[in-house]
Image (cartoon, rainbow, N blue to C red):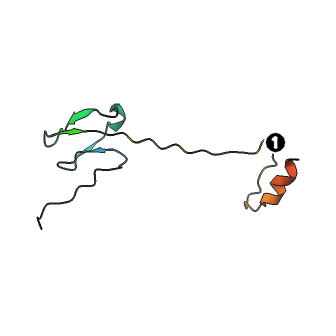
Amino acid sequence: MSGAKEIDHEFTDEVVCPHCGYVLSDSWDFDDGDGADCPECNCKFKISVHHTIEYSTKILNAPQEPAGGNMSHGHFMEVCSR
């Protein structure tokens, strides 16, 4: 087994050089498939951009939830006649 340090470079919040682990602070400037030159070690690598989509919903005209957050789902069902 080699003494090489494992670099966390997959599914990270910023672009990370897979050669040396340098974190590029301008990650938002890159598009999927872009190539990059690491400013730390001068090695080249390819960037893959991953997108995550999440959804939230809210009931229209629903009474405000109390500060304790104890409004039951049954109460919301009363607001909708369906």
Q: Is residue 44 above or below residue 76?
A: above
Residue beneath the point at 14% across and 40% down: 43
Q: Nearer the viewer, residue 24 or 82?
A: 82
Left or right: 5 in relation to 69: left
Q: In what quadrant of the picture does the N terminus appear?
A: bottom left
Residue 10 % position (x, y) = 31, 50
Q: Which residue is mark 1?
A: 61
Q: Residue at image x 37%, y 47%?
A: 13
The residue at the point 28 percent across, 32 percent down is 34
Give the percent coordinates (x, y) of residue 35. Answer: 24, 33
- Counting the numbered discs, the total is 1
Most distant residue in the bottom direction: 1
Q: Position of residue 19 (x, y in %)?
A: 17, 48
* Closer to us: 26 or 11: 11
Measuring 68% from the left and 45% from the top, which residue is drawn there? Answer: 57
In the picture, residue 27 is in which quadrant? top left
Q: Which amino acid lies under the numbered mark 1 shown in the image of this protein? A: Asn
Q: Is residue 81 left or right of residue 16?
A: right
Of helix, strand and loop, which one carries label 1? Answer: loop
Q: Residue 21 vs residue 14: left or right?
A: left
* Residue positioned most to the left: 2
Residue 24, placed above or below residue 70: above
Q: Residue furthest toward the front?
A: 82
Residue neighbourhood size for the residue with mark 1, other residues' Cα within 10 Å, grouped as few (<14), some (14–19), many (≥20): few
Q: Give percent across and percent down for residue 53.
A: 52, 42
